[in-house]
Amino acid sequence: MDEGNLPPLGGGRERGVVGGSAGWWLGLWGGRRELLLDRSGGAGEDVAMAQVDANGVVIEFEQLGDPSDPTLLLVAGLGAQLVSWDDEFCQRFLDRGMSVVRYDNRDVGLSSSMDDGRDPMGLMMSRLAGDDVVAHYLLDDMARDAVAVLDAIGVAQAHVAGFSMGGMIAQSIAIGHPERVLSLTSVMSTTGDPDVGLAEPAVLARMLAPLPDDPDEAMEHRLGIGEAVGSPGLFDPDRARRRAEAEMARGGDPMGTVRQLLAIVSSPSRSEGLRSVQVPALVAHGDVDPLVNVSGGLRTHECLPASELLVFEGMGHDLPPVFWDPLVDRMAAFANL
């Protein structure tokens, strides 16, 4: 990714391992990390990555900015890695005095693969057919991974924002770990109720189609999905290709995305739990989202007692730069910045 302020991904990063919530920075260079992005617009001298080993899963994460600033935890969507959060998008929060934490969910990027030998695609097809299937994990497990990251960096409370599946995980954090959440932002997501937030059948079928073995064909397949679910007239294939190349360079198991999808469809509705969430909440959605219909955002807003709804006209299941500033402005306002 050359559009932000961080050095090229995968180049010369140090990595430490933090063992559970009791090991704040234990073994992680013996002290606090350097700034990763500075507020003058330049990159920090060092780009440091870290891992936390908790819940039997190793989670790769990165903290941007001054660790003493209020923390924004960004939770990525289905199959997306921490590099899916554009550097320029993150910089907007740093400029407002926040520290940004982004991480790889389990089963993607440099976090643990949850492969247990079972065929995830076969399990997914059985689940969609109505059969009883035991998923590898649920969204609540992924929420605990996020909390483990906060434990690792010694952050008691954070502003939590998630996009798509990340919004579902963010909701699960607010429900199951309310003492850790200062504000909640749920973008292009849904509650898990079966009557809202449904994908268009053709889009879902395209996402579940086998990934070609040829790397070039696999890239075109991925870009085709991105255009199909993206905002009409705003999809940028060059930007999407750079992001895909960055993620592919970091590696990962393609079947991890299927296991994540199985976790989504196997997890229960969060509607009742969301009604107990008392922190300020922002719900944002595009009005032409073909993957998670806007009805999912509307239901989320209905369930959250202290929420504000922001519907972007012409936005699909992506976040083109044209929508960054209005979204960041509202998120920063919820953080009182």
Image: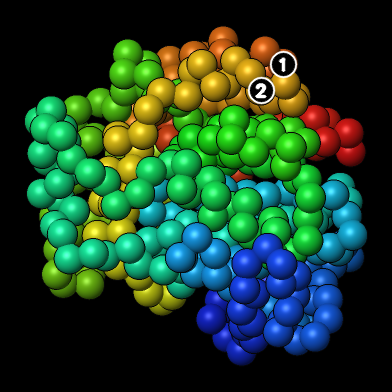
Q: Is residue 247 or residue 105 the one in the foreground?
A: 105
The secondary element bearing badge 1 is classed as loop
Residue 250, image x, y percentages? 43, 75
Residue 137, image x, y percentages? 35, 49
Give the number of the disc on residue 306. 1
- 249 lies above or below 243: below
Q: Determine which quarter of the picture holds residue 323.
A: top right
Q: Is residue 265 left or right of residue 51?
A: left
**Does the rendering let one see residue 245?**
no
Would you name the residue on which mark 2 appears?
277
Quadrant (top left/top right/bottom left/bottom right) for the C terminus? top right
Residue lying furthest front? 22
- The amino acid type found where label 1 is placed reads Ala
Q: Is residue 23 or residue 161 the one in the foreground?
A: 23
Residue 304, image x, y percentages? 62, 17
- Residue at 67% x, 13% y is 305
Between circles 2 and 1, the one closer to the viewer is 2
Q: Are marks 2 and 1 in contact (CB under 8 Å)?
A: yes
**Does the rendering let one see residue 256?**
yes
Question: Few, some or many C-alpha atoms within 10 Å of disc 2 (few <14, some 14-19, many ≥20)?
Answer: many
Q: Earlier in the sequence, mark 2 or mark 1?
A: 2
- The amino acid type found where label 2 is placed reads Val
Q: Is residue 73 left or right of residue 229?
A: right
The secondary element bearing badge 2 is classed as loop
Quadrant (top left/top right/bottom left/bottom right) for the N terminus? bottom right
- Residue at 55% x, 70% y is 53
Q: Determine which quarter of the picture holds residue 252.
A: bottom left
- 82 lies above or below 180: below
- 298 lies above or below 120: above
